[in-house]
Amino acid sequence: MHIPGTTLPYDLNGHVALITGANHGIGAATANALASCGASVLLSYLRASDPPDFPEPYRSNRARTADDVLAAIHLRGGRAVAMEADLRDLQTAPRLFDCAEAQLGPVDILVNNATGWIADTFTTEGQHVTGLKSQTVSPATHDQVFSVDARGGALLIAEFARRHIHRQASWGRIIGLTSGGPLGFPTEVSYGAAKAALENYTMSAAFELAPWGITANIVYPPVTDTGWVNDAVREHVKQSPNLIHIVGPDQVAEVIAFLSSDYARLITANVIHLR
């Protein structure tokens, strides 16, 4: 049963979710949504120190702990724990799963939401559409994003699969978040490429892990206002032939909750593009 006072109709009672980047934005909204459906939740997060030109409240959101999310879940009677963890550390994946198993139980829902986002470009440094300064692609910009979005996500999937198969489980969900797509992401080229890698890892997982009852999908959100959307972004969306909505994190979390449920048992190996 989901927690009283919520409207999501999915029953995730008895399931345990590991959500990365869960201290703000889509990750925090997803933690609340899954907990409201009865799942126990491990909130993984890493506080970020962004440059002063990052917009508020986005910069403040990224710098916070997951304490507010944790308190909201506990207030509604849900089960959740939080762990600050750096996905660039090669030992982070097993540590997160150990934490979840010790305090909540075996993880059977993995949400790869965390990002090492940075704006970079192949041309000259300049202004990103958000007003942030973009950098020229370098080893540093590449590694910042790929170590989290690509390698970090892949290691979490591998750890999820290893433990799932070892305990002979028969139900599991892997959900990743992407942006940019296979055609690239100008002015955010490393971010787009790392997300494309996560997409590919997740599609491979969908086919390899299907015999163990695991579905694996990618959610591609619309422009989601996590504190960074300004008038320039709104005008960009308005003028774009490919963009329709600017949404809040809760709206994306509703889709993730559906994909985590038994209603989505036949949905796997898909990139679900929300507009």
Image (cartoon, rainbow, N blue to C red):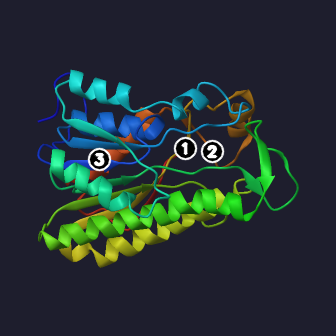
Q: Earlier in the sequence, mark 2 or mark 1?
A: 1
The answer, for residue 107, to whether it is visible in the render is yes
Up the image or down, 75 lies above or below 115; here it is above
Report, in whole angstroms, how far the alpha carbon at label 2 lies from the one at label 1: 7 Å
The answer, for residue 104, to whether it is visible in the render is no
Q: Earlier in the sequence, mark 3 or mark 2?
A: 2
Q: Residue at the location (37% across, 56% down)?
A: 175
Q: Report the residue marked by disc 3.
A: 258
- Mark 2: secondary structure: loop
Q: Report the residue marked by disc 2.
A: 243
- Residue 247 at what x, y percent from top left? 52, 34
On the image, which quarter does residue 203 sit in?
bottom left
- Residue 266 at what x, y percent from top left? 25, 63
Q: Residue at the location (46% across, 61% down)?
A: 152
What is the three-letter code of the residue carrying label 1?
Pro
Q: Do the residues labelled 3 and 2 touch (CB within 8 Å)?
A: no
What is the three-letter code of the residue carrying label 3?
Phe
- Mark 3: secondary structure: helix
Report, in whole angstroms, how far the alpha carbon at label 3 lies from the one at label 2: 23 Å
Judge left or right: residue 230 versus residue 263. Answer: right
